[in-house]
Amino acid sequence: MASKYFKAGAKVFEFLKPKPKVNKTKLDKAKSELAIATQKTKASKAKLNQTLFEIKNKKDLTFKTNKEKTKSNTELKKEKKVEKEKKFKKTMDDNKKVITRIFYAPKNFNKGGRVGLKKGGGSDLGMQSVKHGIDNNPNITAADPKAKFIAKAKNKKSKKKFI
Protein backbone atom coordinates (compact mmCIF):
# COMPACT_ATOMS: atom_id res chain seq x y z
CA MET A 1 0.00 0.00 0.00
CA ALA A 2 2.74 2.43 0.94
CA SER A 3 4.43 2.05 -2.41
CA LYS A 4 1.27 3.24 -4.21
CA TYR A 5 1.20 6.46 -2.18
CA PHE A 6 4.91 6.94 -2.62
CA LYS A 7 4.61 6.66 -6.39
CA ALA A 8 1.70 9.11 -6.40
CA GLY A 9 3.68 11.60 -4.28
CA ALA A 10 6.67 11.28 -6.59
CA LYS A 11 4.46 12.12 -9.58
CA VAL A 12 3.09 15.21 -7.84
CA PHE A 13 6.56 16.63 -7.03
CA GLU A 14 8.13 15.62 -10.33
CA PHE A 15 7.76 19.13 -11.75
CA LEU A 16 10.02 20.52 -8.97
CA LYS A 17 13.07 18.56 -10.15
CA PRO A 18 15.47 20.63 -12.28
CA LYS A 19 15.60 19.35 -15.81
CA PRO A 20 18.79 19.42 -17.85
CA LYS A 21 18.83 21.93 -20.69
CA VAL A 22 19.43 20.23 -24.00
CA ASN A 23 20.25 22.42 -27.00
CA LYS A 24 17.98 21.50 -29.90
CA THR A 25 19.11 23.97 -32.54
CA LYS A 26 22.45 25.39 -33.66
CA LEU A 27 21.36 28.81 -32.40
CA ASP A 28 20.72 27.45 -28.89
CA LYS A 29 24.12 25.77 -28.92
CA ALA A 30 25.83 29.00 -30.01
CA LYS A 31 24.03 30.96 -27.25
CA SER A 32 25.16 28.41 -24.67
CA GLU A 33 28.79 28.60 -25.84
CA LEU A 34 28.63 32.41 -25.79
CA ALA A 35 27.33 32.43 -22.21
CA ILE A 36 30.15 30.11 -21.14
CA ALA A 37 32.75 32.26 -22.92
CA THR A 38 31.47 35.48 -21.31
CA GLN A 39 31.57 33.87 -17.88
CA LYS A 40 35.17 32.75 -18.49
CA THR A 41 36.19 36.27 -19.55
CA LYS A 42 34.56 37.76 -16.43
CA ALA A 43 36.51 35.30 -14.26
CA SER A 44 39.82 36.01 -15.98
CA LYS A 45 39.19 39.79 -15.74
CA ALA A 46 38.56 39.51 -12.00
CA LYS A 47 41.71 37.44 -11.62
CA LEU A 48 43.73 40.03 -13.55
CA ASN A 49 42.34 42.88 -11.43
CA GLN A 50 43.25 41.00 -8.24
CA THR A 51 46.81 40.42 -9.48
CA LEU A 52 47.23 44.08 -10.51
CA PHE A 53 45.99 45.22 -7.10
CA GLU A 54 48.48 42.90 -5.33
CA ILE A 55 51.36 44.14 -7.50
CA LYS A 56 50.42 47.78 -6.88
CA ASN A 57 50.24 47.28 -3.09
CA LYS A 58 53.34 45.02 -2.98
CA LYS A 59 51.59 41.96 -1.50
CA ASP A 60 51.98 38.25 -2.15
CA LEU A 61 50.31 37.08 -5.34
CA THR A 62 47.18 35.01 -4.92
CA PHE A 63 47.26 33.58 -8.44
CA LYS A 64 50.86 32.57 -9.15
CA THR A 65 51.94 31.52 -12.63
CA ASN A 66 51.92 27.79 -13.13
CA LYS A 67 54.17 26.57 -15.90
CA GLU A 68 54.12 22.92 -14.81
CA LYS A 69 52.54 20.29 -16.99
CA THR A 70 49.32 19.01 -15.50
CA LYS A 71 49.24 15.25 -15.13
CA SER A 72 46.78 13.18 -17.07
CA ASN A 73 44.46 10.69 -15.42
CA THR A 74 46.62 7.75 -16.49
CA GLU A 75 49.73 9.35 -14.99
CA LEU A 76 47.88 10.01 -11.74
CA LYS A 77 46.64 6.39 -11.67
CA LYS A 78 50.18 5.09 -12.19
CA GLU A 79 51.47 7.22 -9.31
CA LYS A 80 48.67 6.04 -7.02
CA LYS A 81 49.36 2.42 -7.99
CA VAL A 82 53.07 2.77 -7.16
CA GLU A 83 52.18 4.45 -3.85
CA LYS A 84 49.74 1.67 -2.95
CA GLU A 85 52.35 -0.99 -3.73
CA LYS A 86 54.89 0.77 -1.48
CA LYS A 87 52.37 1.02 1.36
CA PHE A 88 51.37 -2.63 0.93
CA LYS A 89 55.00 -3.78 0.98
CA LYS A 90 55.69 -1.67 4.08
CA THR A 91 52.69 -3.08 5.94
CA MET A 92 53.67 -6.63 5.00
CA ASP A 93 57.21 -6.02 6.30
CA ASP A 94 55.78 -4.56 9.51
CA ASN A 95 53.50 -7.58 9.90
CA LYS A 96 56.47 -9.93 9.52
CA LYS A 97 58.24 -8.10 12.34
CA VAL A 98 55.18 -8.27 14.61
CA ILE A 99 54.40 -11.94 14.09
CA THR A 100 57.09 -13.87 15.94
CA ARG A 101 55.60 -17.35 15.81
CA ILE A 102 56.06 -17.69 12.06
CA PHE A 103 59.59 -18.43 10.88
CA TYR A 104 60.52 -16.70 7.62
CA ALA A 105 63.59 -18.45 6.25
CA PRO A 106 66.27 -16.39 4.49
CA LYS A 107 66.83 -16.92 0.76
CA ASN A 108 69.96 -19.05 1.25
CA PHE A 109 68.42 -21.24 3.97
CA ASN A 110 68.87 -24.87 2.92
CA LYS A 111 69.97 -26.69 6.06
CA GLY A 112 68.21 -29.45 7.87
CA GLY A 113 68.57 -31.55 10.97
CA ARG A 114 70.55 -30.34 13.95
CA VAL A 115 72.40 -27.45 12.31
CA GLY A 116 75.94 -26.93 13.53
CA LEU A 117 76.47 -30.41 14.93
CA LYS A 118 78.98 -32.61 13.16
CA LYS A 119 77.36 -35.47 11.24
CA GLY A 120 73.88 -34.53 12.46
CA GLY A 121 74.14 -35.05 16.19
CA GLY A 122 75.64 -36.69 19.24
CA SER A 123 75.54 -40.30 18.12
CA ASP A 124 78.51 -40.24 15.67
CA LEU A 125 77.45 -43.61 14.35
CA GLY A 126 80.45 -43.88 12.03
CA MET A 127 82.89 -43.59 14.93
CA GLN A 128 81.29 -46.25 17.17
CA SER A 129 83.37 -49.06 15.83
CA VAL A 130 86.56 -46.99 16.18
CA LYS A 131 85.71 -45.83 19.74
CA HIS A 132 85.05 -49.36 20.94
CA GLY A 133 88.06 -50.85 19.19
CA ILE A 134 86.32 -53.06 16.65
CA ASP A 135 87.92 -51.50 13.53
CA ASN A 136 89.78 -48.36 12.42
CA ASN A 137 87.30 -47.12 9.76
CA PRO A 138 85.70 -43.77 10.85
CA ASN A 139 82.97 -44.08 8.20
CA ILE A 140 79.69 -45.85 8.84
CA THR A 141 80.12 -49.60 8.51
CA ALA A 142 77.97 -52.63 9.27
CA ALA A 143 79.67 -53.01 12.66
CA ASP A 144 78.79 -49.51 13.87
CA PRO A 145 75.19 -50.10 15.02
CA LYS A 146 76.34 -53.19 16.94
CA ALA A 147 79.62 -51.74 18.26
CA LYS A 148 78.25 -50.47 21.60
CA PHE A 149 76.66 -53.80 22.40
CA ILE A 150 79.76 -55.75 21.40
CA ALA A 151 81.93 -53.49 23.57
CA LYS A 152 79.57 -53.85 26.55
CA ALA A 153 79.54 -57.62 26.18
CA LYS A 154 83.35 -57.68 26.10
CA ASN A 155 83.53 -55.48 29.22
CA LYS A 156 81.12 -57.75 31.11
CA LYS A 157 83.15 -60.83 30.19
CA SER A 158 86.37 -59.18 31.25
CA LYS A 159 84.87 -58.05 34.60
CA LYS A 160 83.55 -61.55 35.32
CA LYS A 161 87.01 -63.04 34.87
CA PHE A 162 88.46 -60.81 37.59
CA ILE A 163 85.84 -61.71 40.15
Image: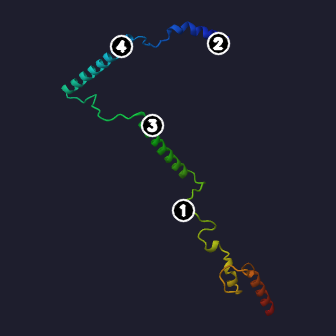
> Where the N terminus falls, by quadrant?
top right
From the image, tell me which residue sits under label 2. 3
Q: Nearer the viewer, mark 2 or mark 4?
A: 4
Mark 4 secondary-structure assignment: helix
How many residues crowd around disc 2 within 10 Å: few (fewer than 14), some, or many (20 or more)?
A: few
Mark 1 secondary-structure assignment: loop
- Find residue 13 and report its image quarter: top right
Tell me the amino acid under the disc marked 2: Ser
113, above or below 146, in the image? above
Q: Disc 1 and disc 4: Cα gap in Å?
A: 72 Å
Residue drawn at x 64%, y 12% as measured from the top left: 3
Q: Disc 4 and disc 3: Cα gap in Å?
A: 36 Å
Tell me the amino acid under the disc marked 1: Asn
Name of the residue lying farthest toward the front? 26
Tags 1 and 3 in contact by the CB under 8 Å rule?
no
Name of the residue lying farthest toward the bottom? 162
